[in-house]
Image: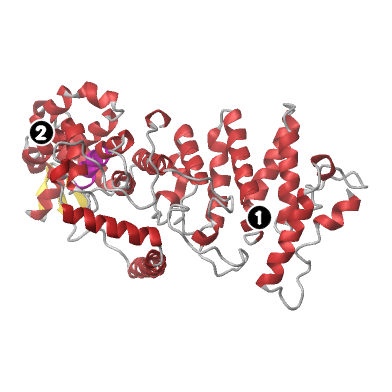
Amino acid sequence: MDGVLSKLLSFPPHPPPPIPLSDSQYDEGIKEQIEVIKKLSNPILLQKTAGGEDTLDQVINPAINTVPYTFILLASISVCSDGNETNTTKIWDKITAYLSLFDLRQIRYLGSEFTAIIDAAASFAQSTNRPGLALVPIRDALLRLDPSGAVLTSNHLRLARLALESRDYDALGPFLDNIVLYVPDCIKIQKPKHLCAMNLNPVTYITSSSGLTATMNYIDVLEYFICCGIACLGIRKWKNALKHFECAITYPTRDTVSKPMVEAYKKWLLTGLITYGKAQTMPKSTSSEVARVYHSLARQYDSLASVFENGSASDLKKEAEQNEKKWITDSNSALVTEVLASYQKFQIRNLAKIYHKISIVEIHNQTTSAEIDGNQLSVSDTERLVLKMINDEELYATLSASPPSPSILTFWPAGPILTESQIQKELSVTKSRIQYLSQEIKMTDRNLKHDRDYIKHLQTQKKASQQGNSDNENQEVETVMSWNDIVEDEDIMGVY
């Protein structure tokens, strides 16, 4: 190993030179190093030093020499199949350390290797029946690669699957809040001259050609949005769940509406009732034909939403019970239960439009539960519900008690009361978010203006709109397709 160690550590120069390398020099140097190391066999890479040290143990620093460390780590993973628990644990420690320390510049040239190490981490965790073990290391590695979370990759999908498998939804962290703006290879973006340029937007180097993601078809994209939506439901982040399901139901496809999209629509509809107390208006990007398909294939759900908005608590309870088998078959029975629970909650919230203060007894008399028959619900039950809503921040109010008089609920004028420092923090976060999105919108506009396929797509759409739809009246409804999507008939309903 001592004979090749100089080759392994030849780049980048350490300590750094007084005059930093130019992007051209860095690009040339790292490519030459990768070419040299790829010619070394695994037995050579796994040799110990003259002093008997393993090169992964304090000989090569992954934060400085990411390239050689990556290839030696992969070589170690490839031979770690003897089932020796000590070796396996040692390699796992090296993998997790690597994912938290790799150099952000060098890793752009090691996309396929990076993805292979992500796969190894996930496979190791699953093989030990602890899929959640890999969640944090993989999540943090992806956030280091792209802190914005705007670029969707196949590694994000692997992470989302692990979260659902382990039921550790919180571990997805920022990915449940972030907005996906780019699916790799969907828009033709000019290849950067030098991958190492630090001013590059992540979308320019996180591509299938760089290896930092595998190619994703539209089924993969739908699965990711649905997985994230389900994860949000698991931790009761209703608005975020609604956002992810909306991304799934509005994703453009050339074929007829797929089964995953219909399932996402059902969850989107129920989540809208829980979040806002009414069925949400179909997103503007959804064509009327697609909307008709959703309504046709989810009639029981539309009916439940209609009763929620216009019927009584007993009517809603009856509607839910009549279609109980349907909810179970669709794995939505727990979500329907939340819908029933939300009915009285919205009645209580709506009292704030009429009253500033109201007693618990009056709340009990003016609201009804869709979960329990009215004669079985006591004033104490109503008070417990109100307290839970306040504690869960579902109701902005205070409850005061002065026995023997009934407790009094006082509604806050407009949402939670924030301190000045909290308001400043909220404004700062919002400003930063707007600035970031403005830059992304400018970049997207610029890419679209120079995309020939997109221009051709617009011309086709214009021609189609002029011809009208008289020839399609008796045909199966199709969705509006984007200019670059893939035709797929695959069914993913078994994966989540």
Residue 173 sits above or below residue 329 on the image: below
Task: Give the numbered dot on residue 102.
Answer: 1
- The quadrant in which residue 355 appears is bottom left
- What residue sits 53% from the left and 45% below the top? 214
Furthest-bottom residue in this view: 19
Q: Position of residue 435 (x, y in %)?
A: 39, 70
Residue 172 sits above or below residue 14 on the image: above
Please state which of residues 352 and 405 is positioned toward the viewer in this rendering: 352
Residue tagged 2: 313
Crowding near pointer 1: few (<14 within 10 Å), some, many (20+)?
many
Please state which of residues 275 and 344 is positioned toward the viewer in this rendering: 275
Please state which of residues 3 and 190 is positioned toward the viewer in this rendering: 190
**118 left or right of 242 in image:** right
Residue 481 sits above or below residue 418 on the image: above
Furthest-right residue in this view: 50
Q: Main secondary structure of the magenta part?
A: helix
Residue interval drawn in magenta: 267-276
Residue 298 visible in rendering: no
Say what secondary structure mark 2 lies in. helix
